[in-house]
Amino acid sequence: MRLICPLRLNRQSLTALRPSHTRYHLPCYRNYITSHAAEQGIYDVVIVGGGPAGLSLASALRSSSVTSGLRVALVEGMDLEPLKHWKPELGTYSNRVSSLTPGSVGFFTDIGVWNHVRRDRVQAYNGMQVWDGVSGSQISFSADLQDNANTIAYMCENNNLVSSLLSRIGELGAGIEIMDKTRVENITFGEDNGGLDLRSWPIVQVSSGKRLGARLLIGADGANSPVRTFADIETRGWDYGQHGVVATLKLEGDRAGEKTAYQRFLPKGPIAMLPLPGPYASLVWSTTPQNAVALKSLAPEDFAEMVNGAFRLNHVDIEYITSHLTSGLVEEVAWREKTSSFEESRVPARVVGVQDKSIASFPLKMRHADSYISERVALIGDAAHSIHPLAGQGLNQGIGDVRSLIKTVEYAIEHGQDIGSVLSLEPYYSEQYFKNHLMLGVVDKLHKLYGTASAPVVAVRSLGLDAVNAFGGLKKFIMERAAGK
């Protein structure tokens, strides 16, 4: 058990670190950490991780009038410079795409990020078709079911979002020190040097040789979070024994303009096709590691035809083809389609091409940290939770973490609290943990429910799906929860 020691200061250091207002009940401070203390490598907030979650938090801290005076450092191992000047080729899209809910987009709008997003590379969709790959039972969602909304979600490349966040941070000016191409080598507690007692403060040792003292250390550093390890926070969960196969697809001309998302639940995992601008779409196909390897080894034309078949053929045919055939799939799928029963209007447009080098895969897992906070530490995004991609909620959960944490830090500052104390951070944990745990649980149960072709299970789940589809009020409730309302 760690003993948490208060920060002990001598008279000179206390003067240097004291906020500019001596009346601590006032809502605004000029700074928590002054330039004198900053010279010693001390920051109010140190964010480890420069992905969408970490950059969103940095941008939100700088955008808020309450937190804009905080001294913030962000550490990222990758080179962020190319994304500051991101210029993608016309007609090509990254295979790393996220489905952003209206709630997430509203947050980005509030902090001034959405103005920097390249809208020509963002695709809104207002319909979604989901069906059982064994029984054919289906449920459809429409944006019309929501109050004052005409969009279910927005498809946005992660590169587009990161580039926009960097642009916004640059626009806001000084106040955030971004240390990219910099690795975290070690995190320890500080020492009492007689002037500053930093024994309860995390000290981040980075590859440049700097030591960063953090009043509040943020772990936005992914599923294998070093910050979470330092805080001695355990995670619970399991691997699904599946891989998610992703690719960027080109669709047939006649129906390429459709902006509807499609998802079919197959016994080996769901397959989803999500619309991108123009005649393009993003694929996420959850399947076994063996099938993932087989799919990635296919020629582009065979891969495209396999995706077409996955939305049209009987699940037994799909499993046979992926397990036994490595070529000639165009003819095989066409032949089997003749004996398959499906409505062309209920399935997505046909795939006619696959973007070069866009096919990839990644292992799927579910993880949830036992806590999101400890003394002077808070976790956000994948450092706190990892979810199956079937509901498209991964990044939205991370943005929800950021929104909640910002409110928590603002409240602490306005009430003269230490932003790094467990007491100050408790509202963030209380608000987000149960909400995220509920979403993780629902998605995990859906995965297990649809991961079998057992006749009794298929019958029960099909009855339930048809029942939900018949009640507009229930579908509206589901959509609002997924949208973050």
Image: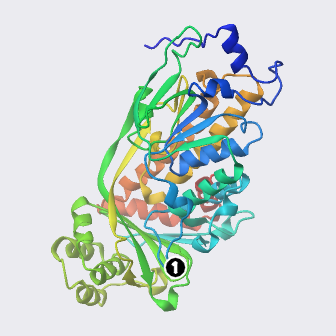
Q: In this view of the protein, can residue 68 be seen by the observer? A: yes
Residue at 56% across / 59% down in the picture? 84
Q: In this view of the protein, can residue 477 be seen by the observer? A: no
Left or right: residue 40 compared with residue 288: right
Residue at 65% across / 44% down in the picture? 403
Left or right: residue 194 compared with residue 231: right
Q: Is residue 100 above or below residue 88?
A: above
Residue 145, picture quadrant: bottom right
Name the amino acid, label 1.
Leu
Which residue is at the front of the view, 362 or 152? 362
Label 1: how many Cα within 10 Å (few below 14, some 14–19, many 20+): few
What is the count of numbered marks?
1
Q: Position of residue 280 (x, y in %)?
A: 48, 79
Which residue is at the front of the view, 120 or 330? 120
* SS at circle 1: loop
Which residue is at the front of the view, 320 or 239? 239
Q: Position of residue 195 (x, y in %)?
A: 59, 11
Residue 472, picture quadrant: bottom right
Where is mark 1, residue-wise? 90
Which residue is at the front of the view, 284 or 420? 420
Q: Position of residue 226 (x, y in %)?
A: 40, 35
Question: Which quadrant of the rendered structure holds the N terminus?
Answer: top left
